[in-house]
Image: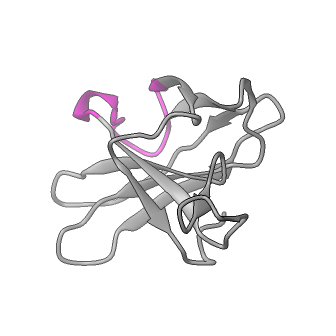
Amino acid sequence: MKGKLTCDGKPAVGVVVKLQDHDTFDPNDTLGCNKTTEDGSYEVQGFTDEKSLIDLRLKIYTDCHDSSLWGLIKNTPCQRRITFEIPKEAINDGQTVTKWFDVGETNLDMKQPSESRACAIFERC
């Protein structure tokens, strides 16, 4: 996966981006993790040896416009977690990426329908 993140019209730098295999009955497998660069772009890839089909998700952990308690407290230890389901056509077969799936540019100013909160200190690469 590759893409670009912005916040307030500027590159979102240092944002954690994870590629995960979503599992229903056991913990999700993190296949890859990276942070956005100075221009807000990212590339993240991973590999798993699953016997069944994988349910791939791209998760973005950001502080862009993040606050809690109705905007009264800024810079909380929690973050906005935005999740995108990845289409099956974007999944490569094997350990080497043969075709990058371009997510495009995501404006983090906007609340996403798939957004939740992550309050774990472990959401780092």
Residue 69 in the image, given as x and y percentages of width and height: 55, 68
Vertical placement of residue 91 versus 117, above or below: above
Whether residue 67 sits left or right of residue 25 in the image: it is right
Q: Inspect the magenta stretch and tell me whether residue 95 lies in it.
A: yes
Whether residue 71 sits left or right of residue 52 in the image: it is right
Pick out the residue farthest to the right: 38
Residue 34 in the image, given as x and y percentages of width and height: 65, 51
Q: Main secondary structure of the magenta part?
A: loop
Query: Going 40% across and 40% down the picture, which residue do you hit?
Result: 112
Residue 88 in the image, given as x and y percentages of width and height: 24, 35
Range shown magenta: 87-102
Query: Going 46% across and 40% down the picture, which residue do you hit?
Result: 111
Vertical placement of residue 95 versus 51, above or below: above
Q: Inspect the magenta stretch and tell me whether residue 100 lies in it.
A: yes
Residue 25 in the image, given as x and y percentages of width and height: 17, 76
* Residue 87 found in image quarter: top left
Vertical placement of residue 65 versus 123, above or below: above
